[in-house]
Image: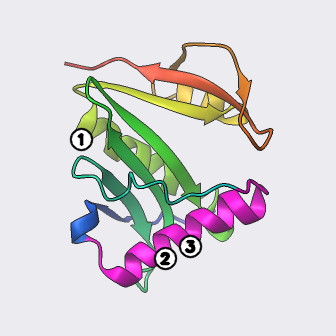
Amino acid sequence: MDQPTTDLRVQQFADLAPDVAYALWALRSQVFVVEQAAAYLDLDGRDTEAGTWHVWCADGAGLPVATLRVLDDGASWRVGRVATAEQHRGRGVATAMVREVLERHGDREIVLDAQSHLEHWYAGFGFTVTGDPYADEDGILHVPMRRPAVR
């Protein structure tokens, strides 16, 4: 197995170069809209909020191969839009990104809506299920999860 991409970056919208922002959203569209056939508007306005953090891994050319975003929802952080390019899956990039989020934001509760097939993967980071599974508008089964603050 290839080594995980170690060029991990954490930036807010204002700090993203335009070509990087474009590549992040193209990656999310490739994974969610094309691969998972979920026709939805990915650009929901939350990427540009002052409290939003973009965590991403770059390849050797500095282009995104994985991404997630962390939203400031007040009392908690919300992780979402976790996406890895197909050719980089299984290399530990998503694990590295989630670990980075826990290090930076673990002092507050973190919530997410996991695709149900990833429930056990998120449980490995201390997330627990907080409600019943539900299908989103595209029929993809999700489960709400949370990880309490670690002081």
The amino acid sitting under disc 2 is Ala
Callout 2 secondary element = helix
How many numbered discs?
3
For mark 2, what is the residue?
Answer: 23
Q: Which of the two residues, 142 or 3, is positioned nearer the viewer here?
A: 142
The amino acid sitting under disc 1 is Arg
Q: Is residue 21 above or below residue 99?
A: below
Q: Which of the two residues, 139 or 118, is positioned nearer the viewer here?
A: 139
| Residue 74 visible to an observer of this rendering | yes
Numbered range of the magenta stretch: 16-39
Q: In this view, does 130 lie above or below 137?
A: above
Q: How crowded is mark 3: few (under 14 residues within 10 Å), some or many (20 or more)?
A: some
The image shows residue 138 at horizontal and vertical percentages of 77, 44
Tell whether label 1 touches label 2 (CB within 8 Å): no
The residue lying at 51 percent from left, 51 percent from top is 94
Tell whether label 3 touches label 2 (CB within 8 Å): yes
Callout 1 secondary element = helix
For mark 1, what is the residue?
Answer: 104
Quadrant of the snapshot with the C terminus: top left
- Relative placement, left or right, of 106 versus 46 is left
Dot 2 or dot 1, earlier in sequence:
2
State yes or no: residue 46 in magenta.
no
